[in-house]
Amino acid sequence: MKRIGLIAGAAVTALTLAACTATGTVSVTPAADASHSAGASAGASTSPSPTGPVVTITPAAGTAKADPSKGITVTVSGGTLKNVSVRTSGDPVPGTYSAGNTAWHSTWALNVAQSYTVTATAAGGATVTKTSTFSTLTPSSTFSTHIIEGYQATYGVGMPIILYFSQQITDKAAVERALQIKTSKPVIGSWYWDEPCNMAPSCAYFRPRDYWPSGTTVSFTGHLDGVQGAPGVYGYHTLTQQFSIGDSVIAVASTRAHKTQIYVNGRLRYDWPISSGRPGDDTPNGSYLTIEKANPVEMKGPGYDLMVPFSVRFTWSGDYYHDAYWSTGEQGFANVSHGCVNLSPADAETYYNLAVPGDPITIKGSPRSGTWGNGWTMWFLTWQQYLKGSALHQAVTAGPGGSTFVDPATLPASTAKAPLGTAPTGNANSY
């Protein structure tokens, strides 16, 4: 039976703090010179010429509408950078030096409509300090980003990070580069762009290559303020979220055998009789994820309108694992439902109490193929297929120190096996 439906604070960031001089000014400190002119009187000395390294800061001092997506660049000729600091009331501005410390660039985009003061000190014959104060543009068009995961909520081992964008994103690579993930346990994964998607003009999903390790804590930061997602369209906020991965709870249902197995933390815990979709209403194949649950759910269809207890949803079109007290006689023997997986009252209650969003459910043995987008169907795709959906065509390695984009060819081979470590290959195909 079916139912249709469904930050930033003041900060001073510095690699090494340096005193800030007046806007756009340069101060030069000559290097000490102990040489004396021949015949000079006692105590007299010559001073070196007040020259030194040339420091360039971009955006230049006084810029009123700097493009935040380009960040800050500091370069030096005739010397090396010793420290660069950025003062702003917006998000902190970390950055990295080039080899040899001849350049520095901010890591993320700058905030829109924000003021910045950059102070850079370089040495080379003399010590030079230069400052630049500027402001970024106020965009006429912006995009916002929504993350599905809730703060400190717990999700299943199949749960992707799901981002919805309010505008169509055309520069997906720029947005993808701004997405950072920290995980308490090492994880390999990839971003995948979906457009159009069910809920927004553009969506991006991070899925691990194999199911998440149980007990993983995940911190997500979207450094999207100032990123140009489409011509003239900028992000205007930094998005952060923290959540956890709970126990591994994996359901595998066979529409032919009229059985479902429930594995908890790698072990078969339950083996229950079921009744799935009758001919014409066949439950579709695929490795889905639990989306939501309720007790009860009102389910309507031709000739019925019922309040159904202990219902766990896995497709948008209205397929559930649920209590079907009316079909216990057929469970284990025949498929009589309108597409849902029917369970006995006791079994449905047990599964309901275990389930959280993101728990994998694999349906197999059906003559009906699964449909991409009918639910959280990211696990329909193999790892190689998923990588093709990344704008950068790169994998992501994440850990306690953050995430890095890497060439997938450099990664060790996966040792995960279906259905407990990853989803079966070709799981959405009809049989």
Image (cartoon, helix red, strand yellow):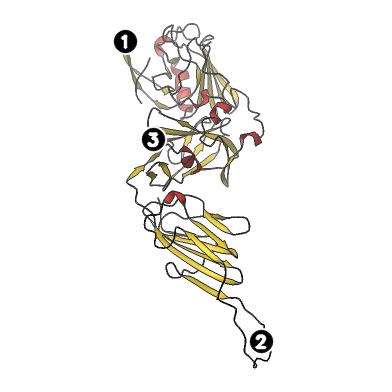
Q: Measuring 64% from the left and 30% from the top, which residue is drawn there?
A: 414
Mark found first going from the N terminus, 1 or 2: 2
Closer-to-camera residue (382/251) = 382
Q: Looking at the picture, how far across and down is residue 305, in whole percent?
A: 31, 14
Q: Is residue 221 above or below residue 92?
A: above
Residue that protrudes farthest toward the right in the picture: 38
Mark found first going from the N terminus, 3 or 2: 2
Are circles 3 and 2 on residues that touch, CB within 8 Å?
no
> Cα distance, mark 3 to mark 1?
38 Å
Residue that protrudes farthest toward the bottom in the picture: 41
Q: Which of the 4 image quadrants contains residue 198? A: top left
> Cα distance, mark 3 to mark 2?
71 Å
Instruction: Name the residue carrying label 1.
Output: 302
Which element is circle 3 on?
Answer: loop
* Three-letter code for the amino acid on which mark 3 is drawn: Gln
Closer-to-camera residue (10/389) = 389
Mark found first going from the N terminus, 3 or 1: 3
Q: Residues within 10 Å of mark 3 (few under 14, many from 20)?
A: some
Instruction: Name the residue carrying label 2.
Output: 37
Q: Is residue 47 above or below residue 240?
A: below
Q: Which of the 4 image quadrants contains residue 298? A: top left
Which element is circle 2 on?
Answer: loop
Q: Is residue 113 above or below residue 327?
A: below
Q: Residues within 10 Å of mark 2 (few under 14, many from 20)?
A: few
Residue that protrudes farthest toward the front in the picture: 38
In the figure, is residue 314 to the left or right of 186?
A: left
| Label of residue 107 in the image | none
Q: Looking at the picture, how far across and down is residue 315, in whole percent?
A: 42, 22
The label nearer to you, 3 versus 2, is: 2
The label nearer to you, 1 versus 2, is: 2
Instruction: Name the residue carrying label 3.
Output: 168
Q: Looking at the picture, how far across and down is residue 265, in whole percent?
A: 58, 29
